[in-house]
Structures are given as C-alpha cells and as structure tokens.
Image (cartoon, rainbow, N blue to C red):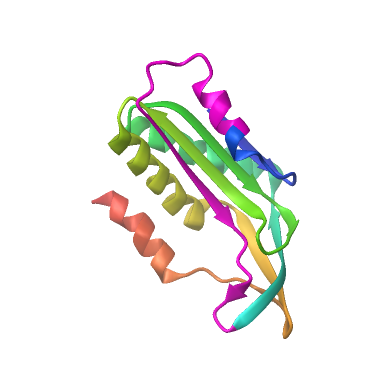
C-alpha cells in the first residue's frame, strides 16, 4: 500500500506501472483522479489551497486504505492526496486499486473516495473573484460514505 500526502503533482501512468510491475495475476486496475474545477456553484475558481496536518493526514489515509483492504481482496493500493496551492485543472487526489476481479477494484476505489471526502483531514480554501472562502462539508458526502455501512 502506497500512501502519500504531497505538494508535488503525481504521474498517473507511473503510479499504475508501479502497481502492476511484474504482476500477471491482476485482472483489474481501477484508478480515480480528482481535479480542481474552475467553477464551484456560481463562482469562478482562480486558485484552491489545501491545508492539512501532515502526520494526521497520512495516518487517516492509511486507516481508510486498511479499511478497504479488509473489505475487498485487493492486491495493491495507492492513495495520493495533494496539498498546497493548486490551479484549475491540477490533480488533487489519486486512488488506484488492483485486484483479481473488477468488482472488488471498482467498489474499493469508490469506498475510498467516499471516505476521503468526509474523513481525510484536508481543508479547502477557494480563491474567487469575490474573495477567499473555506469550502464547507456537504451532506451529500456524508450520505455517500454512510451507504457503505449497509
């Protein structure tokens, strides 16, 4: 399992290659990459700043990864979450899951993203033409996470 909270961008192809290197038993590789949008509601985003507590962030990312590994038969897992100042179009998050079967890889990747949205200790501040503001939690994100409890 590779976990990283980092300011540097990531290379999706390289991260996938790391997980499948010398592996011929994998039947599925699922990746999700989250990007900075240029519009949020009716506001145009100029920049986004993500803040975090370094040790706490990687610990929580690891915890979420371990939860996924307990629920699905994963052969490999990568979670990368960026912090710092980002621009529209920049990568924010990468989740890659590998398994012998596609359903496990798909479900685990979705589970991880649903949990990251609510439990990962990253805070987003958007810079718009109207000024700066912190992005608040959404009940939709809680609903998505809570569906895994069923």
Nearest the camera: 49 or 13? 13
Q: Which residues are magenta?
A: 14-42
* Vertical placement of residue 105 versus 145, above or below: above
* Residue farthest toward the left in the current orientation of the protein: 150
**35 on left or right of 104:** right
Q: Residue at x 54, y 31 (%)?
A: 16
* Vertical placement of residue 13 versus 139, above or below: above
Residue 3: image location, x then y, percent: 59, 35
**91 on left or right of 21:** right
Q: Quadrant of residue 6?
A: top right
Q: Residue at x 68, y 71 (%)?
A: 126
Residue 74: image location, x then y, percent: 38, 28
**Residue 20 highlighted magenta (yes or no):** yes
Q: Quadrant of residue 102?
A: top left
* Vertical placement of residue 43 versus 81, above or below: below
Nearest the camera: 114 or 32? 32
**Residue 27 highlighted magenta (yes or no):** yes
Q: Residue at x 49, y 31 (%)?
A: 77
Residue 33: image location, x then y, percent: 54, 49
Residue 108: image location, x then y, percent: 37, 40
């Amino acid at each position: 399992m590779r976990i990283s909270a980092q300011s540097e961008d990531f290379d999706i192809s390289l991260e996938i290659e790391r997980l499948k290197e010398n592996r011929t038993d994998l039947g599925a590789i699922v990746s999700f990459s989250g990007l900075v949008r240029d519009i949020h509601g009716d506001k145009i985003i100029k920049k986004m700043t993500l803040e975090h507590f370094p040790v706490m962030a990687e610990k929580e990312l690891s915890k979420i990864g371990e939860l996924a590994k307990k629920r699905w038969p994963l052969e490999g897992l990568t979670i990368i979450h960026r912090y710092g100042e980002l621009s529209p179009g920049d990568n924010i998050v990468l989740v890659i899951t590998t398994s012998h079967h596609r359903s496990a890889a798909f479900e685990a990747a979705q589970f991880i993203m649903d949990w990251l949205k609510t439990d990962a200790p990253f805070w987003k501040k958007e810079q718009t033409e109207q000024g700066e503001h912190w992005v608040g939690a959404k009940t939709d994100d809680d609903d998505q996470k809570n569906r895994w409890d069923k």
